[in-house]
Amino acid sequence: MVQKTSVSPSKSGSGAAKKWKSAIFWTLLTVYGLLTLYPLFWLVVSAFKTNLEFMNSPFGLPEVWQLDNFVRAWKSSKMGIAFSNSVIVSIVSLVFTLFISALASFVIARLRFRFKGWVLGFFVVGMLIPIHSTLVPLFILMKQMSILNTYWALILPYTAFALPTAIFVLTAYLTSVPKEIEEAAFIDGTGLWGVFWRIMLPISLPALSTVTILSFLHSWNDFSFALVFISKSTLKTLPLAIATFADGYQTDYGLTLAAMTIAVIPTIVVYLAFQEQVMKGMTAGAVKG
């Protein structure tokens, strides 16, 4: 005997509604993704245009793809030197930021001491300080320390202003780590330093990746600090090198966009390398389980 099964209209209707909602959701995400990627696409395409072609057709494809723009941009602005300077400043400041913030966050999140909340609040307040409001006092301080026109004139401010956000993200993540893991390590004879290096650092990789992205982007793209603290041509970073294509009379858009395309490649590579960990780190500490 064969039994016939029937699907109620309410269930079929709810299934169709879910499909429509899913289709609308993914359509909106696709549109948002295209709108987000279009400026990057426009930048790369415009880098192959001449000035005249850029002015006449800013959103069209180039008639002749000017590969020479990249060669001229690299040579005329000495981008090789500026590129190496940006790499040195960004990497060194990133290493300092990761090491100092990891130690500070471990102490704040895992140890008990008086005024613990005040210490964390002190670093959080640092996130509220406008960076550009410190240019004049920092310039005076660095002049007295005789470190203007050196790598340290950029490394120290980049590290200092990256620490509040880094400590905030890492502390939130380390607080969510169960105490049992730490206690088991102590029972096995692992010291405090061993717990930090062998357990907490590997566990906090998502948060560290988030800090890496945020700190690297800030130091790599900064223009104001480099403009004020660096005047030697041999120490200029990429943003200063790109600014040489524009003066008070005219702007060479082809070379400027070509230089910007070269400068944006490392940030894309770094983000793609850590994108999965970045998403995990952004939500770290939001839910404890």
Image (spheres, rainbow, N blue to C red):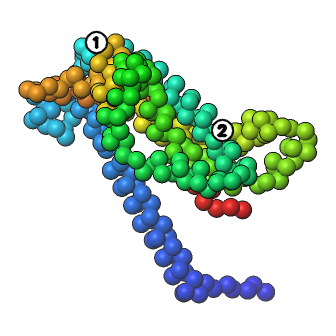
Counting from the top left corner in percent of width and height, residue 263 is at 36, 27
Tell whether 180 sits left or right of 140. right
- Name the secondary structure under disc 2: helix
> Would you name the residue on which mark 1 appears?
75
**Which residue is nearer to you in this view: 28 or 72?**
72
> At x 57% / y 83%, what residue is drawn?
11
Asked which quadrant contains residue 188, the reply is top right
| Dot in front, 1 or 2 | 2
Q: CA distance from mark 1 to mark 2?
A: 42 Å
Q: Is residue 103 visible?
A: yes
Tell me the residue at 60%/35% (across/down).
100
Tell which of 215 and 57 is nearer to you: 215
Residue in the foreground of this view, choosing between 117 and 170: 117
Where's residue 22, x and y in %?
Answer: 48, 66
Q: Residues within 10 Å of mark 2 (few under 14, many from 20)?
A: some
Question: Relative to residue 70, is residue 219 depicted above or below?
Answer: below
Residue type, numbered disc 2: Leu
